[in-house]
Every structure is written in structure tokens, then in C-alpha cells.
Amino acid sequence: MTRDILINDRLWFDRHPFAIVRFRRQHAEEFATLVSQSQQAPVFVPSFCTTDMVRLTWVAVVDVFQLLRDCNASEDGTRLRLRMQTIPLRRADQRVKAREELIQAVASELLDQALMAEAMSCGWDAA
């Protein structure tokens, strides 16, 4: 991923301070670093996608601190954003549905990870 892509996303979120998710077209070689390390980019395909043949030509960018409503994180410019490949979402109604679904999925995963970490730390404290 190039610096220009990161700056572009940063500027977009600066202009939309209450946004949690941004959908945009994927830039060429955006996930090249992952591919060069034999990794795959994360993928989000909304449940309303009815075809097996999906073209992952767009990117969903999730601002995790905004999702968590961590207002202190933005004071010093600290951000944490997840980027994943997704299908083209050209219509506003598609983006609304996909945004809701993606926010729910990311929030659920963060909660599961936090609960697992807490359970593991309690188990270690008891040992």
C-alpha cells in the first residue's frame, strides 16, 4: 500500500469525522505487500450478495477508534483502520446495508477477542 492511499483515507476520515466505514475503489497493487508475503487480504462480502462469482474490486476501510467511540485516540492523531477487499457497492442503499453489516461483524469480532483475552488472563491469574 502506498503512502498516497493512506493519506487519501486519512483526509477522507478527517472530512467525515463521524464516519466509521468508507467504501471506495481499490487502487492497483493496494494489497501487493500481503500478496508478496503469500498472504491474502481480508475480504468482506455482504450477505445480500447473491452470486458466487464476486469481483473484489473495492475496499472497505473501517476506522476502529471511531467504531469504539474513542475520542481520546484522535486527539494525538492516532488511528487504527482495517482495510479489506469487497464487492463494488455503487448504490447508496447497498452501502448502507453493507456498512451496518460490516460494523456489526467487526464489533462482534472485537468483543469476542476482548472476552477471550480477559478469560485467558483470569486463567493465568488463577494458576
Image (cartoon, rainbow, N blue to C red):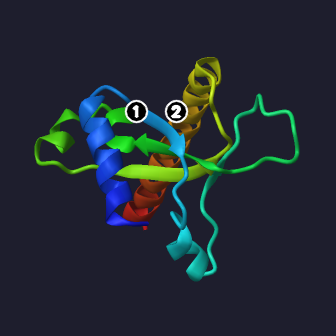
Horizontal side, residue 43 vs residue 7: left or right: right
> Sequence-wise, which precedes: disc 1 or disc 2?
1
Residue holding disc 2: 103
Q: Position of residue 61 (x, y in %)?
A: 46, 44
Q: Nearer the viewer, residue 110 or 12?
A: 12
Badge 2 element: helix
Badge 1 element: loop
Which residue is situated farthest in the front direction here? 28
Which residue is situated farthest in the left direction here? 76
Q: Is residue 68 visible?
A: no
Q: Nearer the viewer, residue 29 or 31?
A: 29
Q: Quadrant of residue 73?
A: top left
**For mark 2, does the 10 Å Cα neighbourhood hold few (<14), some (14 to 19), or many (20 or more) residues?**
some
Residue under the image location 20 percent in, 33 percent down:
71
Q: Position of residue 37 (x, y in %)?
A: 57, 82
**For mark 1, does the 10 Å Cα neighbourhood hold few (<14), some (14 to 19), or many (20 or more) residues?**
many
Residue holding disc 1: 20
Q: Say if mark 1 contacts mark 2, CB within 8 Å.
A: yes
Q: Nearer the viewer, residue 63 or 108?
A: 63
Q: Amino acid at mark 2?
A: Ile
Q: Amino acid at mark 1?
A: Ile
Residue under the image location 49 percent in, 52 percent down:
83
Q: Quadrant of the C terminus?
A: bottom left
How far apart are the two marked residues, 1 and 2, measured between alpha carbons? 8 Å
Q: Quadrant of the N terminus?
A: bottom left
Horizontal side, residue 7 vs residue 114: left or right: left
Residue under the image location 11 percent in, 48 percent down:
76
Q: Is residue 73 visible?
A: yes
